[in-house]
Image (tube, rainbow, N blue to C red):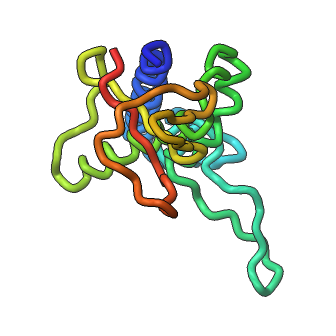
Amino acid sequence: MSTWVDMLRSQYNWNLNDRITQYNQQFIQGDYCCIKTKAEASPLTCFVSKSGATGNPWKDSKFDKKGKARNPRRSAGDIQITALPELKVARPWYNAIDATVLQQNVKRLDTAYKNFFEGRGFPKSKNRSNFTSFTYAMGVKIKGNKIYLPKLGWMRFYNSRSIPNGFTILSLMQVGVS
């Protein structure tokens, strides 16, 4: 688990840096892909994304009720979540981490940006002392004093509060990994 936390922290910091770099690129160049030629930024001709993350800012073609194609713009978090399979190809050691944990890590950064826009401070890079947890969104099972975590398997845990019968665990946060 501590290896996962180290890799997730690295992914979080890389995603944060990607968003900052793309924002600075857009801020400096404005609506232009190239300042010299004054070429307009377009997803067909330019890598500059107005969403604030490296990648394709448009969803795959969807059709409305009239049959007209529409390509809604994706958020920076959606772009980075969509890029996770490419991350696993480029860095195979990320295959060891459950996909939902990687997605929740990007959503954690989205929450930090949401808090920033509500006036709570700009997201900061994380170090070992302030990044000590990860979150599962699905696949967690409990039997007695054992818990199943996808890609980690069954392990013992201290059940501080009993979970009533019939309840389903929707998410789990692993805290205090060091």
Q: Residue furthest right?
A: 67
Q: Residue furthest front?
A: 144
Any part of residue 91 in sight: yes
Q: Nearer the viewer, residue 93 or 72?
A: 93
Does residue 39 lie above or below 12 as drawn?
below
Does residue 118 lie above or below 19 as drawn?
below
Q: Residue at x 71, y 69 (%)?
A: 70
> In which image quadrant can residue 122 be found?
top left
Residue 174 in the image, given as x and y percentages of width and height: 39, 32
Any part of residue 34 in sight: no
> In which image quadrant can residue 150 be found?
top right
Residue 147 in the image, given as x and y percentages of width and height: 51, 35
Residue 40 in the image, given as x and y percentages of width and height: 58, 48
Does residue 129 lie above or below 70 as drawn?
above
Q: Residue at x 39, y 39 (%)?
A: 173
Number of numbered tags placed on the structure image: 0
Relative placement, left or right, of 156 versus 59 is left
Residue 121 in the image, given as x and y percentages of width and height: 18, 41
Q: Nearer the viewer, residue 119 or 28?
A: 119
Q: Residue furthest bottom?
A: 66
Q: Residue at x 40, y 53 (%)?
A: 163
User: Dividing the image into 4 quarters, which one contains the C terminus?
Assistant: top left
Q: Residue at x 49, y 54 (%)?
A: 170
